[in-house]
Amino acid sequence: MMRLSRCGGTPNIGVHASVNESLSLVAANSPPGFVSDIEEALGVETVLTTISGAFVIGSLVRMNSNGAVVSGLIERSELERIEKKIRVTVLPDKVNAAGNNILANDNGAIINPKLGAGAEKKIAGALGVEVVRSSIAGYGTVGSACVATNKGCLCNVNATEEDMKLIRDILKVEAKKGSVNHGSKHVGAGILSNSKGAVIGDETTPIEMGKIEDALMLF
């Protein structure tokens, strides 16, 4: 299922939530309609929360089916709330916006090359997958440059053939290029997706929706 949505007056919905196959962590100030869109399109349970008091959950959390990696700025009460639903690893690195700096599915992860060796080991253990360092389309913030599921990956339109091959090798899915929200290259900021569906920023054009559906194999 694909559904158009927005949160807090913006189509950059990927900033406000993080998802895996069964769970979504959603900004605590999200309107009920946005929460319903996530639950219905992705078939997940939702948990409303903040991270370090902030609502940019998608920028600060990366999850797969094995666990979640969160910013080191997380508060104890927030951590306890999330740990009731999924195993959580706190990222101590200075580059700790986990959602922006990690691209992952249940098969592998690609991380910002600026992350330290200790962070790389923690991410590998938390997500239970092989981890490699690389930029994509020239961006170290690989989690905002792409969106990946266990079925496919949509990349920033400037991704190279080498970038696409790396995704195929590490995430074990085909990668295709596209945009969201009427031309935005940062597709990770505009799409929430798992293998069951996608919630897409509501400024996305029909042509873009077709490419997203194809890349993420939502048919």
Image (cartoon, rainbow, N blue to C red):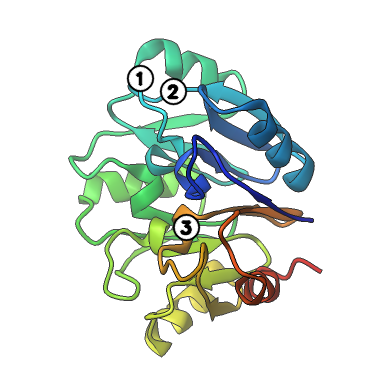
Task: Classify 10 Å Cα crowding around label 2: few (below 14), some (14-19), many (20 and above).
Answer: many
Q: Can you give x and y, in whole percent of width and height, for residue 215 in the image?
A: 63, 74
Q: Residue at x 81, y 69 (%)?
A: 219
Q: Residue at x 61, y 24 (%)?
A: 47
Question: Front-most of 50 and 3?
Answer: 3
Image quadrant assignment for residue 71: top left
Going by the numbered disc 1, the residue's amino acid type is Gly
Q: Earlier in the sequence, mark 3 or mark 1?
A: 1
Q: Residue at x 46, y 71 (%)?
A: 183
Q: Please give the label number shown on residue 50.
A: 2
Q: Please give the label number shown on residue 53.
A: 1
Disc 3 versus disc 1: distance between alpha carbons?
A: 22 Å
Q: Earlier in the sequence, mark 2 or mark 3?
A: 2
Image quadrant assignment for residue 193: bottom right
Question: Front-most of 15 and 194?
Answer: 15
Going by the numbered disc 3, the residue's amino acid type is Gly
Q: Can you give x and y, in whole percent of width and height, for residue 1 in the image?
A: 79, 56
